[in-house]
């Protein structure tokens, strides 16, 4: 699963992200509600884990805003508030589950697995399409023209972000923040290397390239004229 944790406690967040990654999941973190809202809008996550008490924008308001925009990514609310009224308020705000603190990691893991399965069965927004390029967000598999494309985890996240922003200019800063979870430019060629690898996988052998470099500005994934996107 690709999981976003929205948590302002650095120590807790680092520990939970590491645990999720050790359990075989992709996990990244936003440190406040506004950052979490932005990340959840721009990338397709399988599950959100959201602390209720967050700076800048509280967790319930963040989830409520996502729901008002039609973004239905399953959300597990974490909170020290454990009264029935607190749980009801969280669920009515758009949360899909509510886990009081302190909690056992194995229970948290089981709950997000249930949410992910529920979302998979719902079948909403599980595939992204640009021309004959298809990305399945459930299996994390891609294909173009019916040919399977093998992607490494970072390549998958890069392609997913580009496909969710089809026909839009995507800058280096946007990629660093949303794919690498960095808020600064490390002044390396890491983006260029991954773009080059991704381009060779999705465009090599095809007459119409989809991934374009906008010199001095960034990159754009675009369907050839007359092709459809979804």
Image (tube, rainbow, N blue to C red):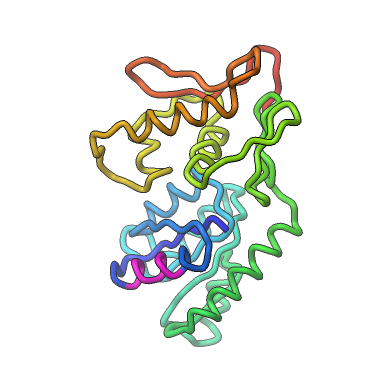
Instruction: State whether the magenta stretch is mostly helix, strand or loop.
Output: helix
Q: Is residue 16 magenta?
A: yes
In this rendering, does residue 230 appear at all? no
Residue at 62% x, 54% y is: 72
Q: Nearer the viewer, residue 169 or 67?
A: 169
Where residue 145 appears, as percent x and y from the top left, is 73, 26
153 with respect to 12 (left or right): right
Image location of residue 133, percent across then percent down? 67, 29
Question: Start and end of the magenta stretch?
Answer: 12-19
Instruction: Name above or below for residue 166 compared with residue 179.
Output: above
| Residue at image coords 36%, 48% | 181
Up-down: is 3 above or below 197? Answer: below
- Left or right of residue 210: residue 227: right
Residue at x 67% of width, y 50% of height: 139
Is any atom of residue 209 visible in this view? Answer: yes
- Work out which quarter of the rendered image holds the N terminus and state it: bottom right
Residue drawn at 59 percent across, 22 percent down = 203
Camera-side residue of 7 and 156: 156
Q: Quadrant of residue 84?
A: bottom right
Q: Is 14 one of the magenta-colored residues?
A: yes
- Which of 38/180 is in front? 180
Location of residue 119 (image quadrant): bottom right
Quadrant where the C terminus sits is: top right
Q: x, y percentage for residue 177?
A: 36, 43
């Amino acid at each position: 699963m690709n999981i976003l944790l929205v948590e302002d406690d650095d120590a807790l967040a680092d520990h939970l992200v590491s645990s999720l990654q050790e359990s075989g999941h992709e996990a990244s973190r936003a440190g406040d509600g506004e950052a979490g809202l932005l990340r959840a809008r721009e990338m397709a996550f399988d599950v959100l884990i959201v602390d209720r008490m967050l700076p800048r924008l509280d967790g319930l308001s963040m989830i409520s805003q996502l729901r008002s925009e039609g973004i239905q990514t399953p959300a597990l609310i974490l909170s020290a508030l454990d009264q029935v009224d607190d749980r009801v308020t969280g669920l009515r705000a758009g949360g899909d589950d509510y886990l009081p603190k302190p909690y056992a990691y194995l229970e948290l893991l089981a709950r997000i697995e249930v949410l992910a399965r529920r979302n998979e069965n719902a079948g909403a927004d599980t595939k992204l399409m640009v021309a004959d390029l298809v990305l399945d967000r459930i299996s994390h598999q891609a294909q173009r023209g019916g040919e399977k494309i093998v992607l490494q985890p970072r390549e998958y996240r890069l392609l997913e972000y580009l496909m969710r922003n089809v026909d839009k200019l995507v800058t280096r800063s946007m990629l660093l923040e949303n794919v690498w979870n960095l808020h600064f430019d490390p002044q390396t060629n890491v983006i260029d290397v991954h773009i080059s690898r991704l381009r060779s996988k999705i465009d090599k052998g095809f007459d119409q390239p989809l991934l374009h470099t906008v010199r001095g500005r960034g990159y754009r994934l675009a369907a050839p004229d007359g092709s459809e996107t979804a």
